[in-house]
Amino acid sequence: MANIVLKNVKKSYGAVDVIKGIDLEIKSGEFMVFVGPSGCGKSTLLRLISGLEQITAGDLVFDGERVNNVIPSKRGIAMVFQSYALYPHMKVYDNMAFGMKLAKSSKEEMDARVRKAAEMLQISHLLDRLPKQLSGGQRQRVAIGRAIVRDPRVFLFDEPLSNLDAALRVATRLEIAKLHHDMEDVTMIYVTHDQVEAMTLADRICVLRDGKVEQVGTPSELYDHPNSVFVAGFIGSPKMNFLTGEFAKAQNCATLGVRSEHLQIVPDGQGMWNGKVVHAEDLGSDHFLFVDVGSDEPLIVRLAGKLDTKLGARVGVQPLEGQMHRFGPDDRPLA
Amino acid sequence: MTTTSLEHGKDRGASLQQQRARAAFWFLAPMLVALFCVAAWPLLRTIYFSFTNTSLDNLYGGHLIGFGNYLRWRTMPSGAVRYYGTLVDPDWWNAVWNTVRFAIVSVSFETVLGMIVALVLNAEFKGRGLVRAAILIPWAIPTIVSAKMWAWMLNDQYGIINDLAVKLHLLDHKLAWTASTDTAMIAVLIVDIWKTTPFMALLCLAGLQMIPRDIYEATKIDGINPIRVFFKVTLPLVRPALMVAVIFRMLDALRIFDLVYVLTPNSSATKTMSVISRENMFDFAHFAYGAAQSTLLFTMLAIFVLLFVWIGKVDLTGETNR
């Protein structure tokens, strides 16, 4: 239930500027994802919001109140760490209750809250165990449970899925999405380097690059209307195809971007570009063709159904009408 | 089925497990030989001597006399029973009491102070590397040197400690710290604590650095006050390292010799088990009697370690952490 506003927030360690002036509003009850390549400052930004790091300049405002100098525990936040940060010598129950014991809540109330959170995450049967007796996924649930028990107004997640294996990651992602639906008025901020997590979880995504906000928007806004080459390349998998040089000049731009699903295969010689199939990947439901049309990297074409094109075959590649992204020399989109 | 006759070729003889065990044995053998020569043999010899009447001037002429060096008795013509041997020797029990008192007091102080120093060194501040190195200096100085150094500082006439204490009106007259029976033990304790706290601090620091940082961040988010964090989080998590450190120090303290021997020679207030056993062996030529005392000391150390490991559930192998 917190509206968070960042006004020109900066952070530097000595001479090194890590966060270079960020303006951002996170609405109450929103699921905001910070995404970006490693070293872009996304984790640092989360730590500034949590209060674990001191803000160098600018204002951090929670519900109209400046909280720059408010200690973490008074900000009404809860945080889920990448490494879970469970207390290894305490049982699951105590891990969840430890933070509350001082919060002057009565014993019954505390107990009720721990059990309710445990039920929500289906870890009630684990309350008497030590963290080392749990699997990675279970530990992550306990960490989330500990955060829920605090009844925070802001939930902070620092790459919570990166220590889990692929299958568990998908399952836990669903859990977190469900949590967001169940706790409608709690603001959630989630840091990840995985754009799939960002796309699937976020109400809005904030793409960070080199300590600055590159673009903020809903997942579909970012996917359909990236406002820079960087965002276009970062969001979406496989990566957007980029063409430069003569290919781009033909479309009156410096960089031309086309997503793999917006390319069609046509008979050789009839496409906008023509070339040889140099590699193919069959995913079962659909398949990717890598076509070398003479650009720096082969074009990736996503096609439905089973792979039926031979390696080495010559094909034409034709982009769909109105699905080309044209960027100017400053890497910004052209109208 | 065409694979009925397996070609054995080179795959004959010992299993992989056996080969591994054999290799391990040959790697361990030199160490076992060395340990036997420097540890097991002298120990067994000492135990053997303790059951003989060997004296220093006739090392190979002794013969077995059973438990006579520990306890024996003779009935006097008057009918009274007289007891002899280490176990009824008041000097021995004085030494036991001195040693135990010294070990408990010194290790307690060293543990608490070492922990405090470690907590300070674990925090981040400018020049931490330098301080970490500097704090080890007392531990690096040979005991003989530091004992002599402190003997001078504690000297009743020229010592700087008496001088300062009198000038600051902490004492009204100069004390003979090392010579007086009232203060000799305090002097030994001061020097030992000064010398060994760095070692404790280093072991505690190693334990502290094993604790992941993000656990402390979690306590910050949870808003737990630092004192509670120390007792509820830090202390339980360094406990295994601390227990091992305490065992090491306790063993060291129970067999202390050099510091006492150099700082307060021949003072009944500080004579420890090691000191008195050496004294019997070499100064009084009661070689077998001293050997019996050494054997008792060894037995007590062994029992202490077993008890400590058992009661404290100390995991010396580190297996549960895997």
Image (cartoon, rainbow, N blue to C red):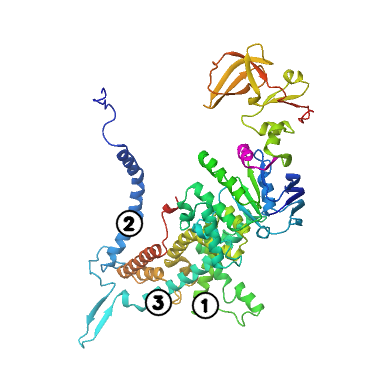
Q: Is residue B104 above or below residue B8?
A: below
Percent from the top left, x then y, of residue A72? 67, 57
Q: Amino acid at mark 1?
A: Thr
Extreme residue toward the bottom, this view: B78
Percent from the top left, x then y, of residue A185? 66, 52
Q: Which residue is mark 2?
A: B40
The quarter of the picture where the N terminus of chain B appears is top left
Q: What element does badge 2 sit on?
A: helix
Q: How would you rate the neighbour count of disc 2 (Cα within 10 Å): few for under 14, some for 14-19, many for 20 or more?
A: some
Residue pictured at 32% horizontal, 78% vertical: B88
Chain of the residue under the numbered disc 1 shown in the image: B
Question: What are the residue bounds of the magenta stretch?
Answer: A193-207
Q: Which residue is mark 3?
A: B94
Q: Is residue A122 found inside the magenta-colored segment of the image? A: no
Q: Amino acid at mark 2?
A: Ala
Residue pictured at 76% horizontal, 20% vertical: A251
